């Protein structure tokens, strides 16, 4: 039996994801001295910062900045509890691969959520 969660919309998911990515981009731009001063490798730095931000915030708080602002949280699919550090890591690795994050099942869960036994729900 699974936790009775409230589905979140695709638009809400993508808006939160875009906000998280833009926040990481802004941090990288600020650390580089501005957008015009960013190095050609800055996209890798942004990706690394995004990975760290999503993993740490999901593991510790159950939500990233974007999730919080759009009223969502990540919980275990089975019982609605907090994710373990390992579950958050698996979810984040698969999220960064993108393809697993845009492929959904009948419950509205992405592959990254099914394999990490988690679900993104309204808070």
Image: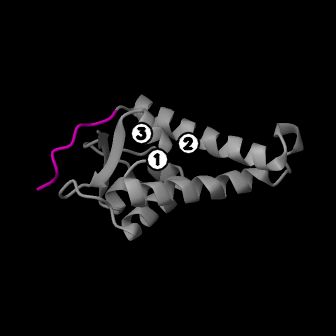
Residue linked to disc 3:
68
Residue linked to disc 1:
64
Query: In the drawing, what numbered circle is on residue 93?
Result: none
The Cα atoms of the two marked residues, 1 and 2, are separated by 7 Å
The residue under the point 59% across, 52% down is: 50
Provide residue 47's location: percent of width, then percent of height: 65, 54
Mark 3 secondary-structure assignment: helix
The Cα atoms of the two marked residues, 2 and 3, are separated by 10 Å
7 magenta-colored = yes
Task: Report the residue that reaches farthest toward the right.
Answer: 37
The residue under the point 25% across, 43% down is: 107
Task: Report the residue that reaches farthest toward the bottom.
Answer: 86
Total residue callouts: 3
Q: Quadrant of residue 96?
A: bottom right
Query: In the drawing, what numbered circle is on residue 20?
Result: 2
Q: Crowding near pointer 3: few (<14 within 10 Å), some, many (20+)? A: some
Provide residue 85's location: percent of width, then percent of height: 40, 68
Provide residue 9's location: percent of width, then percent of height: 35, 31
Looking at the rendering, in which quadrant would you find the C terminus? top left
Which region is colored magenta?
1-8
Mark 1 secondary-structure assignment: loop
Q: Are marks 1 and 2 in contact (CB under 8 Å)?
A: yes
16 magenta-colored = no
Q: Are marks 1 and 3 in contact (CB under 8 Å)?
A: yes
The Cα atoms of the two marked residues, 1 and 3, are separated by 6 Å
* In-image side of 4 versus 74 (left or right): left
């Amino acid at each position: 039996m699974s936790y009775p969660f409230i589905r979140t919309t695709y638009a809400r998911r993508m808006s939160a994801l875009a906000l998280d990515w833009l926040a990481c981009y802004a941090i990288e731009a600020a650390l580089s001295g501005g957008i015009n001063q960013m190095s050609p490798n800055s996209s890798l730095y942004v990706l690394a910062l995004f990975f760290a931000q999503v993993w740490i915030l999901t593991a510790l708080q159950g939500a990233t900045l974007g999730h919080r602002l759009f009223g969502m949280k990540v919980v275990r699919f089975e019982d609605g509890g907090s994710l373990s550090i390992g579950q958050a890591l698996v979810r984040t690795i698969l999220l960064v691969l993108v393809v697993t994050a845009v492929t959904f099942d009948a419950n509205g869960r992405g592959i990254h959520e099914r394999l990490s036994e988690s679900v993104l729900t309204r808070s």
